[in-house]
Amino acid sequence: MWCYFKIDWLTLMGRKSRCAPGRYSIVALSMRQRLEEPGTGGFVYFVEEGVASVIADGGSRMAMELGLIGREGMVGLALVYEDTENPYQTIVQVPGNAIQVDAKKLRSLMQEDSAVRRVLMRFARAFSIQVAATALANGRSKLDERLARWLIMVGDRAGPKFPITHEFISIMLGVRRSGVTTAVQLLESQGLIRAKQALVVLLGKAVSAVGGADETFRSEQGHSRRGWRG
């Protein structure tokens, strides 16, 4: 159940010498580490373990998460779109590790290798669908439904047990912490999760409960799993 499709990025990038071993680094990802800031783009990160969140800063208003990136994708999609500026912030939500690659080298590799370009474009398409589905869920779903969907998406990338706090969830969903506490208690009462001391455990029926009730969620998950395999 908890086995999101993972691309073998090292093999893919090793197809050309400019991203061969020695031209990239394996780096640790720590909680709340900032991988991207608006206007930056010197490196891209292929997540091996952990989860990163792309966030829109609300300025004087509350920030909100736009999408999740795990072992299925990369941080630094502006490069794929041939954009020189990144408007959003990306932070680590669940600790892990990633492959760090110089953006210029990857840009050259994309130009030279159609297979690399094709895989990255497919992930970019899958991510855009995720962002659209998140906007739909934010507009039409109750908070407990949004929380259940979000927890499943994190679990799909990090496994059914992962560290998270109510405060961090409130930032990701753009709601007050008190609302998150109420929603967590409701999901626990329904037997969908267990939450204790900054740790969430997803129970098996959580996926069937959310997926069975939401056609958009099923469609989004299906596309993300099959839509961009190399």
Image: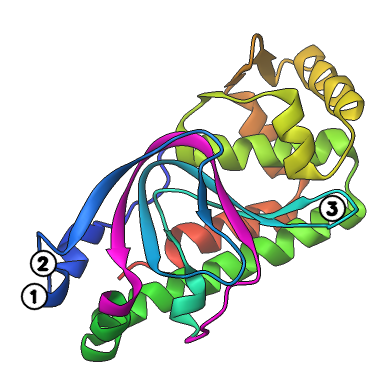
Q: CA distance from mark 3 to mark 1?
A: 44 Å
- The residue mark sitting in front, 3 or 1, is 1
Q: Is residue 5 above or below residue 31?
A: below
- Residue drawn at point x = 43 percent, y = 46 percent: 4
Q: Residues within 10 Å of mark 2 (few under 14, many from 20)?
A: some
Q: Quadrant of residue 86?
A: bottom right
At label 3, the amino acid type is Asn
* Residue 145 disc label: none
The disc placed on residue 17 is: 1
Q: Quadrant of the C terminus?
A: bottom left
Quadrant in the picture for residue 67: bottom right
Q: Which residue is mark 2?
A: 20
Disc 2 from disc 1: Cα separation: 5 Å
Labels 3 & 1 near each other (Cβ < 8 A):
no
Residue 159 forms part of the magenta stretch: no
Q: Position of residue 81 (x, y in %)?
A: 50, 83
Q: Residue at x 84, y 57 (%)?
A: 59
In front of the other: 118 or 223: 118
Residue 15 vs residue 212, the one in the foreground: 15
